[in-house]
Image (spheres, rainbow, N blue to C red):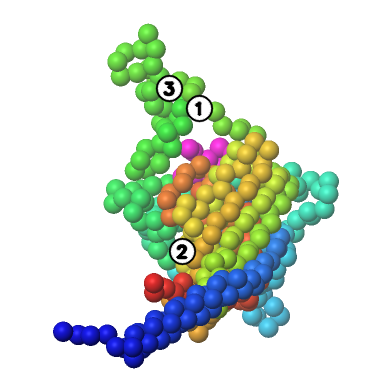
């Protein structure tokens, strides 16, 4: 039989007292940590510059009625030394017959985008009241996706120019386009930006062959006098804005970006996320835009080697009937320090693009080609290679309980 003694009792009381005191100390320390105010989250607000330019090739994302490029952005200009250099903050009409970079066999080779200059037809006057602001904007022609040319996905269409100007080295979204039956046949002509085909649209009395892109009149009209398979044409079900889009209207867009760090992690003593907020006005009303992120791995040196990815999924921004946009999204670890960014995922810049075909393609930036179904309207790449911010974020740590 075990018998408590006075010494044993004192020893037990003493151990319990110590344990209670330790629990109190840990609790008080934890409370004091929680009570310590978090540092004020760093934030920056910048204007997103207007543009008509995505990658350098093709020279712009909109063209005039003749298919010549309307460039508001950077021109590639040959210097007296023979070197071609990018000259920012320019506005000009660049010929669709510009000779792009070529390899030794005279085939398009966009490995070095600065191996050829733009052929400038004339510079644009963007001052208030200028006739140039009334220029109607067009979407470029396209096709075929494959052929005897350098690059991939012909922009402009092969019947329109001698050379391809599309520098993409791979199809932007091969999961949805092109199918094998479309690779050497699909084409789409030059057309006004406000009349780019919208898939499934009923009311323009047009349909498009899925393999060739050719226009035909559908048998989709219904009514009591129509046979079971329908009458020629379509019922006027859908509506779209048929107002011509001008260069002046395009450049009226005002876009502001605010980036605020978020989700401070006490363990790593850093922020693990950032909130990206875009507020815009004077955009095209009731339109679809998207925000794409250029990351370090999109570049090779100072050259764009691949298209940007969505900042978030979905990357869609919808303008209201007054042309206003309010977009906000929190992104995890968008600004890792370069020494910890082995995959090159640090966000360097953003580009806002207009989806003229009104499609939302999941995480795909586009279906056809730059200047064909997407059109850059705002870009922060003027800050390249420094990036839009010098913020540092960290990967969220797994906390033990």
- Crowdedness of circle 2 by 10 Å Cα count: few (<14), some, many (20+)? many
**Label 3 secondary element:** loop
Location of residue 286 with respect to 225 vertically, above or below = below
Residue that appears at 46% across and 72% down: 396
Taking the image as shown, residue 215 lies to the left or right of residue 194, namely left
- Crowdedness of circle 3 by 10 Å Cα count: few (<14), some, many (20+)? some
For marks 2 and 1, give the CA distance.
Answer: 34 Å
- Boundaries of the magenta span: 188-198
On the question of residue 183 being in view, the answer is no
Residue placed most toward the observer, 28 or 255 = 28
Q: Position of residue 41 (x, y in %)?
A: 64, 68
On the question of residue 286 being in view, the answer is yes
Q: Residue furthest top?
A: 225
Q: Which residue is mark 3?
A: 233
Q: Which residue is mark 1?
A: 238
Q: Earlier in the sequence, mark 2 or mark 3?
A: 2
Q: Which residue is mark 2?
A: 168
């Amino acid at each position: 039989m075990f018998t408590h003694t006075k010494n044993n009792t004192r020893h037990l009381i003493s151990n319990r007292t110590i344990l209670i005191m330790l629990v109190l100390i840990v609790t008080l320390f934890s409370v004091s940590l929680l009570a310590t105010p978090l540092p004020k989250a760093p934030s920056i607000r910048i204007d997103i510059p207007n543009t008509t330019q995505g990658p350098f090739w093709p020279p712009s994302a909109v063209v005039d009625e003749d298919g010549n490029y309307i460039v508001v952005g950077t021109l590639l200009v040959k210097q007296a030394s023979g070197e071609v250099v990018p000259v920012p903050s320019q506005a000009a009409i660049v010929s669709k017959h510009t000779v792009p970079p070529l390899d030794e066999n005279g085939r398009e080779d966009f490995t070095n985008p600065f191996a050829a200059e733009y052929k400038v037809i004339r510079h644009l006057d963007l001052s208030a009241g200028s006739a140039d602001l009334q220029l109607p904007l067009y979407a470029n022609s396209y096709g075929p996706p494959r052929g005897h040319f350098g690059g991939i996905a012909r922009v402009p269409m092969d019947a329109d120019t001698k050379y391809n100007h599309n520098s993409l080295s791979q199809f932007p979204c091969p999961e949805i386009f092109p199918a094998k039956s479309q690779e050497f046949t699909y084409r789409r002509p030059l057309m006004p930006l406000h009349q780019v085909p919208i898939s499934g649209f009923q009311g323009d009395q047009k349909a498009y062959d899925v393999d060739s892109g050719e226009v035909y009149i559908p048998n989709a009209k219904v009514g009591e006098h129509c046979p079971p398979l329908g009458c020629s044409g379509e019922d006027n079900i859908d509506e779209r804005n048929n107002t011509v889009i001008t260069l002046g209207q395009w450049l009226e867009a005002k876009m502001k970006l605010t980036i605020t760090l978020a989700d401070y992690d006490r363990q790593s003593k850093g922020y693990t996320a950032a909130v990206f907020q875009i507020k815009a006005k004077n955009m095209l009303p009731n339109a679809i835009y998207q925000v794409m992120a250029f990351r370090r791995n999109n570049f090779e040196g100072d050259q764009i080697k691949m298209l940007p990815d969505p900042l978030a999924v979905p990357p869609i921004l919808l303008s209201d009937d007054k042309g206003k946009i309010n977009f906000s999204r929190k992104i995890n670890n968008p600004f890792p320090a370069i020494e910890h960014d082995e995959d090159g995922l640090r966000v360097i810049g953003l580009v806002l693009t207009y989806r003229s075909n009104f499609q939302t393609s999941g995480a795909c930036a586009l279906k056809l080609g730059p200047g064909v179904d997407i059109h850059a309207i705002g870009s922060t790449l003027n800050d390249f290679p420094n990036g839009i911010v010098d913020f540092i974020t960290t990967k969220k740590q797994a906390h033990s309980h």
